[in-house]
Image: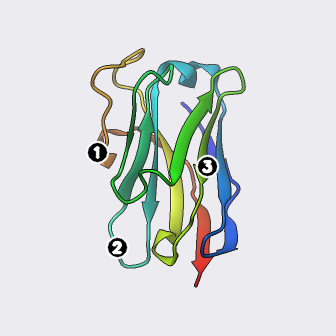
């Protein structure tokens, strides 16, 4: 069982920045693909970014490409999402998740939320205009 805890959300003005963190309860998470997803009120949970176990493969949603950066520190068991140039449409609850199906995978990292086994409780990000 892996527990994921997000932090770093808050209220920020448009154009501002936030850095989200997601800390895992077990070191074994370092072998898994990790992702960030978000869910705005009344909308489906959507993919934001994904990173392979050793950061060799990274994929972003088109809506955040060039503004957000995903990274990880496997020594600290922590996943990050640096969010710059924030827009009101980035307002959502942000979740981190782990895909434990294929450890040490660099070639077929997945962006579909249904493929992810473990989820954090979410952290609210609100961007004011």
Query: At 44% from the left edge and 26% from the top edge, which residue is drawn?
Result: 52
- Residue under label 3, please give it: 82
Q: Earlier in the sequence, mark 2 or mark 3?
A: 2
- Residue under label 2, please give it: 43
Closer to us: 26 or 71 = 71
Residue 14 numbered mark, or none: none
Q: State left or right for residue 116 relative to residue 118.
A: left
Picture quarter containing residue 3?
top right
* Residues under numbered marks 2 and 3 in contact, where contact means CB atoms less than 8 Å apart: no
Q: Secondary structure at mark 2?
A: loop
Q: Give percent across and percent down for residue 79.
A: 60, 37
Classify mark 3: residues with Cα within 10 Å, few (<14), some (14-19) or many (20+): some
Residue 112 numbered mark, or none: 1
Q: Earlier in the sequence, mark 2 or mark 1?
A: 2
Mark 2 to mark 1 CA distance (whole Å): 16 Å
Q: Is residue 96 above or below residue 78?
A: below
């Amino acid at each position: 069982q892996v527990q994921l805890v997000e932090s770093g959300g808050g209220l920020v003005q448009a154009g501002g920045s936030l850095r989200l963190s997601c800390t895992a309860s077990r070191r074994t998470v370092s072998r898994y693909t990790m992702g960030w997803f978000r869910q705005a009120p009344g909308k489906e949970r959507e993919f934001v970014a994904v990173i392979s176990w050793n950061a060799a493969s990274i994929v972003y949603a088109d809506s955040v490409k060039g503004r957000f950066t995903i990274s990880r520190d496997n020594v600290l068991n922590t996943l990050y999402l640096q969010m710059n140039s924030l827009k009101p449409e980035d307002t959502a609850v942000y979740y981190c998740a782990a895909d434990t199906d294929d450890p040490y995978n660099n070639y077929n990292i997945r962006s579909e939320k249904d493929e992810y086994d473990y989820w954090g409780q979410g952290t609210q990000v609100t961007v004011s205009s």
